[in-house]
Amino acid sequence: MVTTSDIVPAGTEFPKWETAVRAARQAKVLGAADVDPGRYGGTADPSILATDCILGLRRAKFRLDRVVHLEHVIRQLGPVAIDEALSVSGKVAEVAPSRAGERSRIVFEFRRSNGTIAVSAEAVVLNAEPSALKAGSAEGDPRAGYRLIGRKLLTPPKAQTYTEELANRIHFDPAYAVRFGLRAPTAPGLMELTWLVEALAAKGLPKAFEIRAKFVAPLFWDDGVDILAANGTMRCVNSAGVLTCEAQVQTQ
């Protein structure tokens, strides 16, 4: 059970840290997500920086085994190069009660060596046990009116490799997942974010863009996934016909 003492209060600023998307890191993460590691050349896939956001929560004493990732926003203001050093800052902007637990909104900035912001991000998390994850059900056809732009097939090794940095048992320990009423470990919503960036980059990654993703149902480590698009919206739908992620996308 999550207690009041587990909640990091609004206004908390994280200790700053340094990060970079190294070539080997990008190749490993994209390979696990079935994305061509050479797709972006010498440019970093900004979805990998979203992992740094979640790791930043651990730095701020969030318990990652008691955090359910609900939403993620990533705004790229300009391309980030492979190996480019970035300074990261984070702050708990808001904490609000909900029926399932406290919802925290955390904001991040990734700054270049000259002090300018390259990428900003927001994460909304629920301070709750993994039992708060709901498998979801197929209501209507979430594919209706959308065109298919990609298809993925997850496997446990792929999900484990993608989530290795997070070291969260919900992504790799079947017994732990079953303990919280889930049929299997879950792939992180960030994996879906990686697929959305890949789809956005079909004709080359835009220099500036924003993706606002909501993770509405868990994606399991053995799911098949359709990636769909229509009128600035992208969706991920699993093989059972359940909508797992919906995102609004804007480019400049």
Image: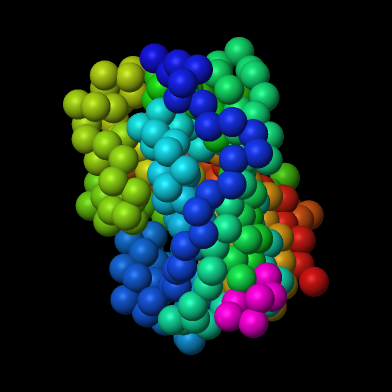
Is residue 114 something one can see in this rendering? yes
User: Whole-percent x and y of residue 217?
Assistant: 51, 32
Q: Is residue 33 above or below residue 186?
A: below
Q: In the displayed structure, does residue 243 sit left or right of residue 117?
A: left
Q: In the displayed structure, does residue 107 sit left or right of residue 132?
A: right
Front in this rendered view, residue 117 or 204: 117
The residue that appears at 34% across and 49% down in the rendered structure is: 166
Q: Is residue 37 above or below residue 103?
A: below
Q: Quadrant of residue 165?
A: bottom left
Front in this rendered view, residue 158 or 127: 127
Q: Is-magenta flag for residue 96? A: no
| Residue furthest out toward the bottom | 42
User: Whole-percent x and y of residue 223?
Assistant: 37, 41
The residue that appears at 47% across and 50% down in the rendered structure is: 56
The residue that appears at 76% across and 67% down in the rendered structure is: 251
Is residue 159 something one can see in this rendering? no
Image quarter hosting the N terminus: top left
Q: Is-magenta flag for residue 115? A: yes
Q: Is residue 182 above or below residue 225?
A: above
Q: Quadrant of residue 231?
A: bottom right
Main SS of residues in magenta: loop
Front in this rendered view, residue 69 or 239: 69
Front in this rendered view, residue 238 or 94: 94
The residue that appears at 23% across and 52% down in the rendered structure is: 157
User: Whole-percent x and y of residue 85?
Assistant: 49, 78
User: Whole-percent x and y of residue 121?
Assistant: 63, 55
Q: In the displayed structure, does residue 238 sit left or right of residue 116?
A: left
Part of the protein shown in magenta:
112-117
- Number of numbered callouts drawn: 0
Image quarter hosting the C terminus: bottom right
